[in-house]
């Protein structure tokens, strides 16, 4: 593949627009795992890892943020910057893959912009999901596999290294090792090419053996990630079918808070696949090599994730990690890319004019952005409320701020860390009624002018909506010694339809 000057300009345009979109729709701290994702690299700035902890074993995952904390300091920006950059660079991988298969710079640009605007790509790129880091290494390995087909030694070594990186973000890398083995078997059968497979196997063996020796020294066992792994949840046999419908619902309908995730991309994929099959039947188009490569990525990963998501498996119970929407992110890349590619295939086959092609892609991109706006809206409103609260808190300068513990963590560690304001985090309680009891018992010890953040629960996605100082869930709906200072935008996604507010302790006027 020869990269021309126009390609460099297009790559710069694609990256700039992608980054701009992700900043425009930025959500920030909205996932329940954010505390762990943030505190782990923060901990490593002063302490060494504890490799008995499953999260600490995934050193590629937290290592990225640790490096950025070292360079840029600890802040919201430095925490999200690695994933913002990775997400913005995914359309570049798409562009180079398309160009590799002989598509023009013009068509590669259209496909990449369609990909960059895909709702799930923007959704994941505007928050902190380790699934993005995992997928970035997997598809960087795929690009490497394609670009170095004439240099099998380099190809095998690089794919081995990148999939090893992916493995130490998520163990689901083994699913993609299966996909790459299919590609290698195809190379072996079609081109009698075996060197790359051998180098891939040897590279993987050496890397896993070396790190295994390190694990034996540190932990005492060769495969600690099989012993110290995330919790699994037993599912009764009569709930298995219901469980298997969760991921298809996420793909074709949306999230549990009634917002879209993939938008219309899955429908575009199916519609244009159907059109392409009809044209193939009429011998006006071909099922090409890139079709062969992309399909296994999303089909195999979906099948394994849906039906074999975790270990151990038992005959009497089905074990599965919670069905979290972000786990589906690795199929977004091949699905969005394949949908965009098939549109261009149809254009070429039917010889549509360039002006019509531009118009249709612009229309599809606008549709994508409308759905991206919907997908990210809850997170953006949540962050807007949070930042407004932070501004008000800094202006008022209270002696203490009370909040639900999840929010309190980020107030203390990120937003108010450079102030003298004390954030009071109430440990080991969650339910609103527990918070009400705690407030009654400790109110007398709080200084006057203490601020209370009410009706503002935990993370947006899979949030604990009954957690914290939820006044609507209190037995006594009003705070006797407190004065309402300000209300913020309603959180429409919440089952409680919360209206976040700040209250100030007014002991003097009460007396």
Image: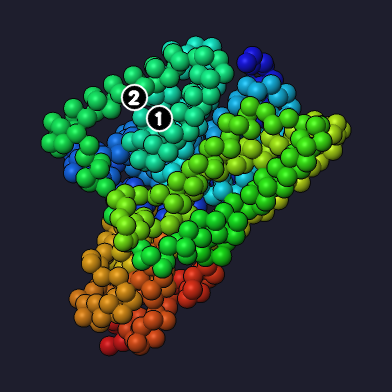
Q: Residue at x 52, y 65 (%)?
A: 257
Image quadrant occupied by the C terminus: bottom left
* Rendering coords of residue 480 (x, y %): 34, 86
> Would residue 54 be seen by someone viewing this image from the given angle?
yes
Place residue 336 in its image quadrant. top right
Q: Nearer the viewer, residue 420 or 490?
A: 490
Q: Secondary structure at mark 1?
A: helix
Left or right for 52, reference 298 = left
Q: Residue at x 22, y 46 (%)?
A: 228
> Would residue 406 be seen by someone viewing this image from the given angle?
no
Label at residue 426: none
| Placement of 253 over or under 117, stated as above or below | below
Label at residue 163: 1
Place residue 453 in its image quadrant. bottom left
Q: First in sequence, mark 1 or 2: give its number.
A: 1
Q: Residue at x 81, y 41 (%)?
A: 359
| Placement of 411 over or under 222, stated as above or below | below
Label at residue 204: 2
Inter-mark Cα distance, 1 to 2: 8 Å
Tell whether label 2 touches label 1 (CB within 8 Å). Answer: yes
Q: Residue at x 70, y 42 (%)?
A: 273
* Rendering coords of residue 447 (x, y %): 24, 73
Left or right for 36, reference 271 = left
Left or right for 155, reference 271 = left
Q: Nearer the viewer, residue 371 or 297?
A: 297
């Amino acid at each position: 593949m020869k990269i021309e000057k126009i390609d460099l300009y297009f790559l710069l345009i694609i990256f700039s627009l992608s980054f701009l979109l992700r900043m425009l729709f930025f959500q920030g701290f909205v996932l329940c795992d954010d505390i762990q994702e943030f505190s782990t690299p923060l901990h490593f700035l002063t302490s060494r890892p504890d490799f008995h902890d499953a999260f600490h074993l995934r050193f590629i995952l937290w290592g990225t943020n640790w490096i950025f904390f070292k360079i840029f300091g600890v802040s919201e920006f430095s925490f999200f910057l690695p994933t913002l950059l990775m997400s913005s660079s995914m359309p570049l991988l798409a562009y180079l893959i398309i160009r590799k298969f002989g598509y023009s710079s013009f068509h590669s640009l259209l496909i990449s912009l369609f990909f960059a605007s895909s709702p799930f790509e923007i959704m994941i790129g505007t928050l902190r999901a380790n699934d993005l880091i995992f997928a970035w290494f997997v598809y960087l390995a795929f690009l490497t596999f394609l670009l170095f087909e004439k240099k099998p030694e380099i190809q095998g070594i690089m794919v081995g290294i990148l999939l090893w990186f992916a493995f130490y973000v998520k163990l689901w890398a083994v699913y993609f090792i299966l996909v790459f083995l299919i590609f290698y078997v195809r190379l072996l059968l079609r081109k009698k090419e075996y060197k790359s497979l051998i180098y891939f196997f040897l590279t993987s063996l050496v890397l896993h053996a070396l790190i295994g020796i390190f694990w034996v020294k540190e932990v005492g066992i060769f495969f600690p990630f099989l012993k110290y792994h995330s919790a699994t949840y037993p599912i009764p046999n009569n709930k298995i079918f219901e469980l298997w419908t969760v991921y298809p619902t996420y793909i074709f309908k949306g999230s549990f808070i009634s917002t879209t995730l993939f938008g219309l991309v899955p429908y575009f994929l199916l519609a244009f696949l159907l059109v392409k099959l009809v044209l193939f039947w009429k011998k006006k188009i071909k099922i090409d090599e890139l079709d062969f490569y992309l399909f296994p990525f999303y089909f195999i990963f979906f099948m394994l994730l849906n039906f074999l998501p975790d270990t151990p498996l038992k005959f009497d119970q089905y074990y599965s990690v919670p069905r979290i929407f972000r786990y589906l992110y690795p199929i977004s890349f091949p699905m969005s890319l394949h949908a965009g590619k098939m549109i261009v295939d149809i254009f070429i086959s039917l010889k549509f004019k360039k002006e019509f092609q531009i118009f249709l892609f612009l229309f599809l991109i606008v549709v994508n952005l409308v759905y991206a706006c919907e997908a990210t809206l809850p997170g953006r409103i949540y962050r807007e409320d949070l930042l407004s609260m932070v501004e008000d808190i800094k202006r008022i300068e209270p002696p203490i701020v009370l909040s639900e513990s999840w929010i309190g963590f980020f107030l203390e560690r990120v937003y108010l860390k450079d102030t003298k304001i004390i954030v009071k985090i109430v440990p080991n309680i969650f339910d609103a009624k527990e918070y009400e009891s705690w407030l009654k018992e400790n109110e007398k010890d709080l200084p006057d002018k203490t601020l209370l953040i009410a009706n503002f629960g935990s993370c947006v996605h899979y949030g604990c909506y009954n957690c914290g100082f939820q006044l609507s869930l209190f037995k006594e709906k009003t705070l006797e010694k407190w004065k309402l200072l300000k209300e913020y935008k309603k959180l429409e996604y919440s089952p409680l339809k919360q209206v976040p507010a700040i209250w100030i302790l007014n002991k003097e006027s009460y007396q």
